Amino acid sequence: MLKAVLGTKVGMTQLFDENRRVVPVTAISTGSWFVTQVKKGSSDGYSAVQVGLPRERYRSLEFSPEWLKNKKKFFLFVREVSIASLNEQDYQVGRAVSLADIAISVGDLVDVQGTSIGRGFAGGIKRHGFAGGPASHGSCFHRIPGAVGHRRTHGEVDKGKRLPGHLGAEHVTVRNLKVVKVDVELGVIFVCGAVPGKSGFLVTVSKRG
């Protein structure tokens, strides 16, 4: 049994629960993944399954061993997933990976890991939520960080000082998201709430417990 399932973020939508209340959900596609390599404890020192997501133009084709000779050409993502107990008969190279390998059902709590959207270089107000100075004329202090070396020898800056810099593009984990709907045929999971990243970004869904 796999400890996590890989997928791509499709986008956000809304569903209705049993009480006819609107629930904001994020759709995560987990289909079209294939086993590309099996890691064994005897040879590699740990047990894991390497899976690959074919590029869009190859997803309608059947898996071919030729794809393994040039993974960058045929696969969009290639990642490893830890496995509790390895059974080589269950995980052979070329086998399709489905939601049944992690047994996610409606009502389960999952953790979703992904990469947040990159915002480029940002100032202190946008990056850290600083209030800034007065917006009136003549204040000379609108959106600048202000003094950063207060009462330090030679104006040294404290380690960890919140300053302008690169915003986003960080590894983020959102915990305890409830699974609202599971479409096994399409291989899509609907989780309540938002997950990091843009549409098409790679995410990892881990079942809690």
Image: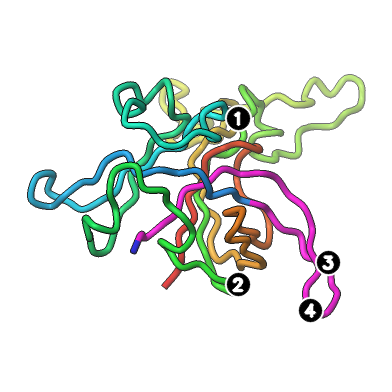
Q: Which three-letter amino acid code belongs to the residue tagged 3?
A: Val
| Front tag of 1 and 4 | 4
Count all numbered tags in the image, as a single digit. Answer: 4
Task: Please name the residue that numbered disc 4 is placed on.
Answer: 18
Looking at the rendering, in which quadrant would you find the N terminus?
bottom left
Residues under numbered marks 1 and 2 in contact, where contact means CB atoms less than 8 Å apart? no
Q: Which three-letter amino acid code belongs to the residue tagged 2?
A: Val
Badge 4 local density, few (<14 within 10 Å), some, or many (20+)?
few
Q: Earlier in the sequence, mark 2 or mark 3?
A: 3
Q: Which three-letter amino acid code belongs to the residue tagged 1?
A: Gly
Q: In the image, residue 80 lies at what x, y percent?
A: 33, 44
| Magenta highlight range | 2-27
- Which residue is rendered at x = 57% and y = 30% of the image? 56
| Front tag of 4 and 3 | 4
Residues under numbered marks 1 and 4 in contact, where contact means CB atoms less than 8 Å apart? no
- Report helix, strand or loop for mark 3: strand
The vertical placement of 57 against 86, above or below, is above
Q: Depth check: give the residue in front, 93 or 200.
A: 93
Q: CA distance from mark 4 to mark 2?
A: 13 Å
Task: Please name the residue that numbered disc 3 is placed on.
Answer: 22
Residue 106 - label = 2
Q: Main secondary structure of the magenta part?
A: strand
Looking at the rendering, in which quadrant would you find the C terminus?
bottom left
Badge 1 local density, few (<14 within 10 Å), some, or many (20+)?
few
Task: Please name the residue that numbered disc 1 is placed on.
Answer: 118
Q: In the image, residue 125 lies at what x, y percent?
A: 71, 33
